[in-house]
């Protein structure tokens, strides 16, 4: 199963892990964990080689997220279709042109994901303004992931109210996050749109929990579905 998995043969890997789990032997616990991951990847259907690679990461970094949004979401194509002013009376194209002219984040140069980081920072999706650090190797947690998705939704819909719509809800829709949390609105928005959910049994969102590559890919597919509903 692992051989298939790391050769990006995800369907075959899923079948092999399922067989080991069914045997209920000494390796069934580990196989079950790998089976769940391979199932998520199969459902997310990564379409690029770099997307398949990041899908295997247990914890993604900011650079990984930039790669997934650029390659799997095709963010540049998405932005080219959007001509509505998104922020400061700028269209996404105007925003990117203004940011690109100032250069990329200060710590992107020479990084393996430099091209993708510059692309994302150009649209203002992830923090890392021109000349400022991007921190590409820092891990991404669920709250930060939702903040990026919130920014994306705000830009592509041209609806800035999405970034404040759920603040101050009483009671909070999550057992572990007050509505005053800085990322509460983003988490509520992603939950409302079916992009990233709280635990069904506990109602906990776990904002500080790391995001895996498989979960990030699944959320990107959910984001794409949300966009189809929006437009």
Image (spheres, helix red, strand yellow):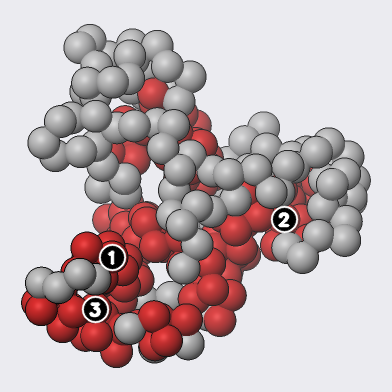
Q: Which residue is mark 3?
A: 17
Q: Residue at x 88, y 40 (%)?
A: 131
Number of callouts:
3
Q: Residues within 10 Å of mark 3 (few under 14, many from 20)?
A: many
Rendering coords of residue 85 (x, y %):
60, 43
Rendering coords of residue 107 (x, y %):
84, 47
Whichever of labels 1 and 3 marks the residue nearer the N terminus, that label is 3
- Would residue 106 be seen by someone viewing this image from the given angle? yes
Relative placement, left or right, of 48 versus 31 is right
Q: Nearer the viewer, residue 179 or 31?
A: 31
The C terminus lies in quadrant: bottom left
The part of the image, by quadrant, that contains residue 16 is bottom left
Q: Residues within 10 Å of mark 2 (few under 14, many from 20)?
A: many
Look at the picture and state if 132 lies above or below 47: above
Q: Which residue is mark 1?
A: 30
Whichever of labels 1 and 2 marks the residue nearer the N terminus, that label is 1
Q: Residue at x 44, y 32 (%)?
A: 208
The numbered mark at residue 117 is 2
- Would residue 85 be seen by someone viewing this image from the given angle? no
Q: Residue at x 29, y 32 (%)?
A: 205
């Amino acid at each position: 199963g692992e051989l298939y998995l790391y050769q990006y043969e995800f369907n075959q890997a899923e079948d092999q892990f399922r067989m080991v789990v069914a045997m209920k032997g000494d390796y069934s616990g580990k196989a079950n964990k790998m089976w769940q991951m391979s199932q998520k990847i199969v459902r997310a259907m990564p379409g690029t080689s770099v997307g398949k690679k990041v899908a295997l990461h247990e914890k993604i970094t900011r650079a990984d997220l930039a790669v997934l949004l650029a390659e799997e979401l095709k963010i540049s194509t998405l932005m080219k279709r959007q001509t509505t002013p998104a922020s400061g009376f700028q269209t996404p194209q105007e925003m990117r042109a203004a940011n690109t002219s100032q250069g990329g984040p200060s710590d992107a140069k020479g990084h393996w994901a430099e091209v993708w980081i510059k692309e994302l920072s150009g649209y203002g999706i992830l923090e890392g303004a021109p000349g400022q650090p991007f921190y590409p190797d820092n891990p991404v947690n669920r709250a930060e992931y939702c903040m990026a998705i919130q920014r994306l939704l705000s830009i592509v819909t041209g609806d800035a109210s999405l970034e404040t719509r759920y603040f101050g809800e009483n009671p909070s829709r999550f057992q572990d996050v007050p509505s005053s949390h800085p990322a509460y609105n983003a988490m509520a928005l992603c939950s409302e749109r079916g992009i990233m959910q709280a635990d069904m049994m506990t109602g906990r969102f776990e904002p500080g929990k790391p995001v895996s590559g498989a979960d990030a890919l699944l959320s990107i597919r959910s984001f794409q579905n949300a966009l189809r509903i929006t437009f």
